[in-house]
Image (cartoon, helix red, strand yellow):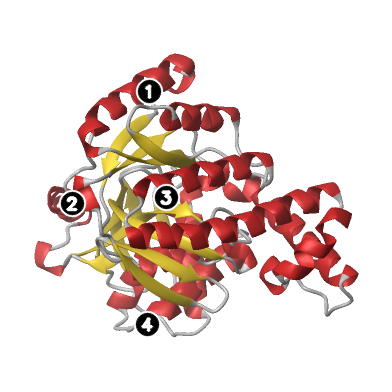
Amino acid sequence: MEFPDIKQQKARLIENLCREYGAAAEEVTVVASPYRICPLGAHIDHQGGPVLGMTINAYTLMAFCASSDSSVRLKSKNYTGNVFFDLNEIPESTGSFWGIYPRAAALALKETYEIKAGVVGLLDGMLPGCGLSSSASVLLAYLYALAQVNSLHLEAWELVHLTKRAEQGYIGLNNGILDQTSIVFGKKDHLLHIDTKGEAVSYLADRLGDEHYRIVVAFSGHSRELTTSGYNSRVDECRMAAEQISAMAGKKTATILSDVSVEDYRQFSAALDPVPARRSSHYFGETQRVADGVMAWKSGAIETFGRLMNESCRSSMEQYECGIQPIHDLQQIVSSTEGMFGSRFMGGGFGGCVVGFVKPSLAGDAVQHINTAYRQLHPEVAEQTRVYLARSDSGVRLL
């Protein structure tokens, strides 16, 4: 199954917005904010680690136009309830549970800018809550829309920082910058090598493309909610490891693991408490897998790249200790499917999906096999699960 055609989705969304709010079609703008995959670099961006990201042809689409006043009025094709609030007096609750995201975007933007014009919008996410960073995707859509109607020009890294501020300050997620950086800087037919500590992005051209692999996205049917899962506690445990190692090394207290040298880690890791030991083992192992993955990608060694994805997922389960059983089951099904080079789960493992790279000639059969096998194993989510074939695409943009 392929993701829906973006041009057709855009046309339907504009038509629906005009019908819902009486807007004129020529006044409507559509922002496409893609989802992202992270083949390698699992759970280390919040520690300043290096990561690999890629935007794909699945998106949050938002059709919008300026409102006649400072009000924000939103509807979603994915969720029930409307969102309404005034930019001059943003309330604690916006009338719908998904309203936390436009509220956070508006509050983050108001910290730096005076925004007077409100927005009327209709949203449609192709696979929300799936672990492909739909939360950062929708936040960027809101930021784009509010900036557009208020004639603001936001630079790329400013968008990254605003999204992070919205997530950490107003949603309560102690994340890094993998998601928003991937979505802002995404480039079709390229893998992004992101230095999350130094805030730098390198583009790695895809030497292989559709003739050598397709991307499989298998949604478990379990949406993930990182703020109520073990995500934030894992971040704290990584910081605990950094503090313990730096103390044993007699150095200035480190608050993230990227401030700890590999030499100090190797010397003192055996003396760590068990939980911080496992978290730091994952961090330093994953940073090496990212480095190896860059070399494999540059040389076109997709088999090696896939093997590193499998190793990353195993470390996520055993050392980082994240995931729920259905996600583990799904990853086992995906990784054992004929023609699969490698796979790992997205969304922190607390629900979400599994992403794999598969031989193009076997991609169709792989989708059918994964869909059938997983639904048989977990019939309770048979109606929610989906398996797609995806391609790389460009980052957030106005259509």
Residue visible at 62% across and 44% down in the picture: 315
Work out how far the residue at label 2 is from the one at label 3, CA to CA, in angstroms.
Answer: 29 Å
| Up/down of 281 relative to 370, above or below | below
Work out how far the residue at label 1 is from the one at label 4, CA to CA, in angstroms.
Answer: 41 Å
**Secondary structure of the residue carrying numbered label 1:** loop
Count neighbours of disc 3 (C-alpha within 10 A) and say few if under 14, some if 14 to 19, many if 20 or more.
many
356 horizontally vs 199: left or right: left
Front label number (4 vs 3): 3
Q: How many marks?
A: 4
User: Label 4: which residue?
Assistant: 155
Task: Work out whether mark 1 precedes mark 4 in sequence or the reverse, and give the earlier one.
Answer: 4
Q: Amino acid at mark 1?
A: Glu
| Up/down of 32 relative to 256, above or below | above
Q: Give the camera-side residue of 164 and 178.
A: 178
User: Label 3: which residue?
Assistant: 305
**Secondary structure of the residue carrying numbered label 4:** loop
Q: Amino acid at mark 2?
A: Ile
- For the residues labelled 2 and 3, say whether their Cβ atoms are less than 8 Å apart: no
- For the residues labelled 1 and 4, say whether their Cβ atoms are less than 8 Å apart: no
For the C terminus, the quadrant is bottom left
User: Label 2: which residue?
Assistant: 6
Q: Is residue 389 visible?
A: yes
